[in-house]
Image (tube, helix red, strand yellow):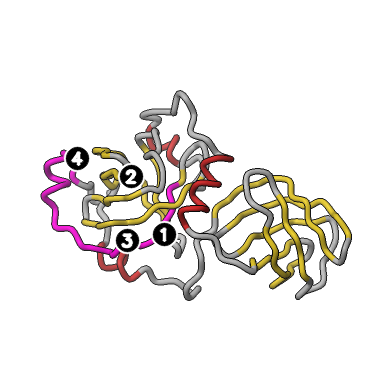
C-alpha cells in the first residue's frame, strides 16, 4: 500500500514545503488540460497558481514536464491559487529534480482539433494532436517535406507560422517562429476547453484515471 498523504488541511499547511520558484506544469481535468505554476511542494501536497479561475473539479491530476503524474485533491482556493492534497505521498526530491530524457522540453497539451495548414502555397486539412508554447504536433493526409515553411490556423488560437521540424509517417512536429507566453496559451486553452457548469465531483480513483491513462 502506498503511503497516504495528510488528509487534514491543517496537516497539509503544517507539512514542510519547498519553494519551486514557480515551475511550469499542467493539470489534467475532465474538460481538458491547462497550464499552471507550482508554487511549492511537500510530501502531502502542492500549491498551484493558475492564469485564470481555478478548475472547479475537486479531484484532478498534476503532470510535470517529464510526464510524471500526481493525483491531487483540492483543499483550499483563493483567487487564482489553490492548495491540493496528494493522493499518495510525494517524493519531494524526485519532484524537484524532475528527471527526464528530454532537456528543456516545453509542456504539451493534448488538444484534438481540425487544422487548416498552408504549405508551399497550397491549403490542406490536418488534425491537431497537441500544442505547446513553442510548437504543435499535427496529423496530415500526406507527408510534408521536413523544413517546409507552414501557416497553421485553428479555431481559438491566433494564426501561427513555423516550419516542419520532424516527421514520422503522416505525423509532423511544427516549431513556431514566435513562442507564445504561458499566460496567452492558458487563455486560449481555456477558451476552447471551457470548464463545465456542473463539474464531476468525488468520482473516486476510477474517475481520476479517465484522461491520465
10 Å neighbourhood of mark 3: few (<14), some, or many (≥20)? some
Depth check, mark 4 against mark 3: the one in front is 3
How far apart in space, not on screen, are marks 4 and 1 (Cα)?
A: 23 Å
How far apart in space, not on screen, are marks 3 and 2 (Cα)?
A: 18 Å
Depth check, mark 4 against mark 1: the one in front is 1
Q: Residue at x 27, y 38 (%)?
A: 77
State which region is magenta.
6-27
10 Å neighbourhood of mark 1: few (<14), some, or many (≥20)? some
Based on the displayed image, in which of its 4 quarters is residue 59 positioned?
Answer: top left
Relative depth, front residue between 204 and 142: 142
Secondary element under disc 1, as helix, strand or loop, is loop
Depth check, mark 3 against mark 2: the one in front is 3
* Residue 9 forms part of the magenta stretch: yes
Q: Which residue is mark 1?
A: 64
Q: Which residue is mark 4?
A: 7
Q: Which of the numbered marks, if any, corresponds to residue 72?
A: 2
Who comes first in sequence, dot 4 or dot 1? 4
Secondary element under disc 2, as helix, strand or loop, is strand
Q: Is residue 166 left or right of residue 31?
A: right
Who comes first in sequence, dot 4 or dot 3? 4
* Residue 110 forms part of the magenta stretch: no
How far apart in space, not on screen, are marks 4 and 3 (Cα)?
A: 24 Å
How far apart in space, not on screen, are marks 3 and 1 (Cα)?
A: 12 Å
Q: Which residue is mark 3?
A: 22
Amino acid at each position: 500500500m502506498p503511503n497516504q498523504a495528510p488528509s487534514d488541511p491543517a496537516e497539509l499547511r503544517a507539512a514542510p514545503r519547498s519553494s519551486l520558484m514557480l515551475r511550469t506544469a499542467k493539470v489534467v481535468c475532465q474538460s481538458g488540460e491547462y497550464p499552471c505554476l507550482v508554487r511549492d511542494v511537500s510530501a502531502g501536497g502542492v500549491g498551484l497558481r493558475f492564469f485564470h479561475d481555478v478548475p472547479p473539479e475537486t479531484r484532478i491530476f498534476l503532470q510535470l514536464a517529464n510526464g510524471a503524474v500526481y493525483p491531487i485533491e483540492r483543499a483550499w482556493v483563493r483567487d487564482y491559487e489553490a492548495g491540493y492534497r496528494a493522493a499518495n505521498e510525494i517524493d519531494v526530491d524526485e519532484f524537484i529534480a524532475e528527471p527526464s530524457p528530454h532537456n528543456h522540453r516545453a509542456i504539451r497539451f493534448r488538444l484534438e482539433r481540425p487544422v487548416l495548414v498552408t504549405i508551399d502555397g497550397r491549403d490542406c486539412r490536418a488534425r491537431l494532436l497537441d500544442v505547446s508554447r513553442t510548437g504543435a504536433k499535427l496529423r496530415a493526409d500526406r507527408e510534408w517535406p521536413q523544413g517546409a515553411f507552414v501557416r497553421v490556423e485553428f479555431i481559438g488560437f491566433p494564426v501561427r507560422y513555423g516550419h516542419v521540424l520532424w516527421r514520422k509517417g503522416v505525423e509532423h512536429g511544427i516549431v513556431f517562429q514566435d513562442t507564445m507566453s504561458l499566460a496567452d496559451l492558458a487563455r486560449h486553452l481555456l477558451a476552447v476547453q471551457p470548464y463545465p457548469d456542473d463539474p464531476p465531483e468525488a468520482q473516486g480513483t476510477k474517475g481520476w484515471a479517465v484522461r491520465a491513462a
